[in-house]
Amino acid sequence: MNKALRIAHILRNASAFQGKDVVVQGWVRTRRDSKAGISFLEVNDGSCLTNLQVILERDRPNLAAVVERLTTGSSVEVHGTLTPSPGKGQSVELLAGNIFVYGWADPARYPLQKKRHSFEFLRTIAHLRPRTNTLGAVARLRNRLSYALHTFFQEEGFFYIHTPIITTSDCEGAGDIFRVTTLHPAQPPTSNPEALYAQDFFQKPTFLTVSGQLQAEIYALALGKVYTFGPTFRAENSNTSRHLAEFWMVEPEMAFADLQDDLALAQRCLQYVVSDLLENSWEDLQFFERFVEPGLNESLKAFKEQPFEVISYTEAVNILKKCKEPFAFPVAWGADLQSEHERYLTEKAFQRPVAVIDFPRDLKPFYMRVNDDGKTVAAMDVLVPRVGEIIGGSQREDRRDMLLEQMHRKGISPEAYAWYLELREYGSAPHSGFGLGLERLVQFVTGLGNIREVIPFPRTPGHADF
Ligand code: ATP
Ligand code: MN
């Protein structure tokens, strides 16, 4: 079974394989029968976007027996000889000597036929949708981006730290968190809410993490430069095209680094992974250029050269107030930037990535470093075309007194974060970091408008299937 070669490997080395006998395994995308007694199979094995064309001569008895039933979706193993292809669109094809069918796919029932299916429909068949060109390409790009992100941070001297999924801290101080419990809601062990947690697994309220940052800070203040890369959970009860309840986030954290260092790291990181894709995932990117977002390639090529435009939140608000754009949400100093505002800044006002820094203190979480003006914090949001915010980061408050003040201001209990305060008591150091959402990054490089298409199994309000 494992003598088979991957189609990507064959196509990359097509001239070396010409005239050679090879075995491939994959799924039939289409079959076409010519009158001349030849059938053409398009076989895809997931290793790349391109199918391998397989030539079946129907006068061979061993082939004739199966050809008729070989329909879209069947899994096959083809033994044959690789020959130059006279046809358009491929350099080589596989002249089949023998074919084994592992599994048929009843054409009357198999949902993926050779036509365009809507993304909404494909979401209902998440167990089959990776066999489409779009979702296959997304999966390969996600893989390459993850690999490139690890490579980038490793080469920059960061250590990969595994921060917990189950936590007792709600980092953002917001209410959008999932609770973790072993208690059964229909059978509470006691009706006394005070006594309830004593019966629970951890004997206190626990949640799925919204960010690994606070724990990453611990390790940054020991190892210098660290990053986490894992699943993150937010019970945002909003149905937008850029929010998931479960998403993946890369979070670097550096000691002895200020906001400028953080900005520089974010820019190097994004430019590195985009360059990597342009070099190593060209075929999949081309697919999105052709079918999803014309102009994508040019915009990615420009992106890897362009320095970020850095503006303060106050400047951003002034630009938004002055422009004639009919926004749905009002613009005012002290209010959050909405997606439409973010996209205006990066797509129209500057036509390049924009980093907005120094946000009002009251808009951001307690851990961001308070600026000398006392009104703003050393925060940064990186905005990119098509997506809006892709990165959120900050310099962290490293002064114990100021951190305490921030906690009081925001109603956060210093007892619950005693260890976080202690980090500011023993060898505190300026430190900074950010969170980069992997799915937003995939949206950016593919042009896909809905975040549900860029993760294999999207979790959104009311949806946790597969
Ligand atoms: P937004 O304002 O877009 O809701 P946020 O400010 O709440 O995002 P951060 O807490 O700064 O997000 O998280 C860092 C990064 O994680 C964001 O810049 C984004 O790329 C990603 N991210 C945040 N929330 C989500 C989500 N619900 N689904 C997917 N990605 C997310
Ligand atoms: Mn943010």
Image (cartoon, rainbow, N blue to C red):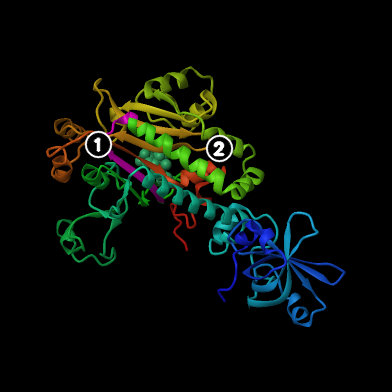
Q: Is residue 449 visible?
A: no
Q: Is residue 49 left or right of residue 40?
A: left
Q: Estimate the x, y position of residue 350 in percent, counting from the top left.
A: 51, 24
Residue 180 lies in magenta, yes or no?
no
- Mark 2 surroundings: few (<14), some (14-19) or many (≥20) residues within 10 A: many
Residue 335 picture quarter = top left
**SS of the residue under disc 1:** loop
Give the residue type that dot 2 points to: Leu
Sequence-first tag of 1 and 2: 2
Does residue 302 lie above or below 132 as drawn? above
Which SS does the magenta portion mostly show?
strand
Residue type, label 1: Tyr
Toward the front, the furthest residue is: 16
Q: Residue at point 44% right, 59% down?
A: 464
Image location (x, y in percent) of residue 289: 63, 43
Left or right placement of residue 429 versus residue 442 in this view: left
Query: Which is nearer the eye, 254 or 191?
Result: 254
Image coordinates of residue 241 in percent, x first then y, are 50, 44
Q: Which residue is mark 1?
A: 367
Q: If the picture is divided into quarters, which one holds ligand 1?
A: top left
Q: Which residue is mark 2?
A: 300
Residue 181 appears in view: yes
- Residue found at x 30% / y 48%: 212
